[in-house]
Image (tube, rainbow, N blue to C red):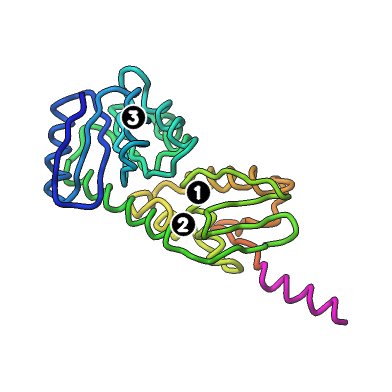
Amino acid sequence: MLQEVPAPAQRHVLVADDDPRIASLLTRYLQGAGFTATVVANGLQVEPEVRRLDPSLVLLDIMLPGLDGIEVCHQLRRFSAVPIIMVTARVDEIDRLLGLEVGADDYVCKPFSPRELVSRVRAVLRRTEKSREGKEGAIQVDDRLKIDFDRREVWVEGRQVKLRPTEYRLLYHLVQNAGWVVTHDQILAKVWGYEYRDEPHYVRLYVNYLREKLEEDPTNPKYILTERGVGYRFVDYKREEETASKKIKK
């Protein structure tokens, strides 16, 4: 059964949790923070409600009846870039990484402070909305790689490559700073948020994901370069274009 919580706000959060006490607590805090909310108690209900409501964000419990949160997240990422925060009683690192790997934007463990969770909701929305605002048009990095930030599309050798939302935000931040070294701390703050400043392995993991999708030889990358002990640098494609142009003129 769906529970509607009306409030005078534009942003809508879909809460997927089968514990009515937690769902009620979350909707009260969300409403107090200016959000509206819809609650579902079964994993099988999430995809239809996302398609129907087009919510601003999904709070997704990992232990749902019908279909667990990991499978739901994987299902949603086939058609939607809606921000997802996983909410779970599991604390194992492998579960946290798995949630992020299938496309979650953040991960909160129970027990949690409702105020903190609302703060995380706002932080995730700020990050995702900021990356969507970036209108840079189409960038032809070289004859293999094309990135269209307006359409949120990436093309490799004429074939469109699907990126998870976190992968897209990471690529966006690296390309925005092309030619410059971006530190692990800077990447964590911009892509994941300051609460992840002690989790540099997330950066390495997602850089590897991007290299697997973009590089011709991920073990010898030409786009995302490692600056050992510091961070990463996206190739300065504009300078390379200028250099190539000068060589042609000569």
Query: Could you tell me if the residues under marks 2 and 1 are in contact, i.e. CB atoms within 8 Å?
Result: yes
What's drawn in magenta, residue-wise? 237-250
Three-letter amino acid code at disc 2?
A: Ile
In the picture as drawn, the residue positioned furthest to the right comes out as 250
| Relative side of 224 to 216, left or right | left
Three-letter amino acid code at disc 1?
A: Val
Residue at horizontal 31 percent and vertical 18 percent from the top: 65
Q: Which mark is residue 187?
A: 2
Residue at horizontal 27 percent and vertical 47 percent from the top: 121
Q: CA distance from mark 3 to mark 2?
A: 31 Å
Mark 1 vs mark 3: in front: 3
Q: The C terminus appears in which quarter of the rendering?
A: bottom right
167, 196: nearer the viewer: 167
Three-letter amino acid code at disc 3?
A: Val
Percent x, y for residue 178?
A: 59, 66
| Relative side of 76 to 16, left or right | right
First in sequence: mark 1 or mark 3? 3
Label 2 sits on a secondary structure element that is helix
Query: Could you tell me if the residues under marks 1 and 3 are in contact, i.e. CB atoms within 8 Å?
Result: no
Residue on which the image places disc 3: 46
Residue on which the image places disc 1: 203
Q: Which quadrant would residue 48 be assigned to in this image?
A: top left
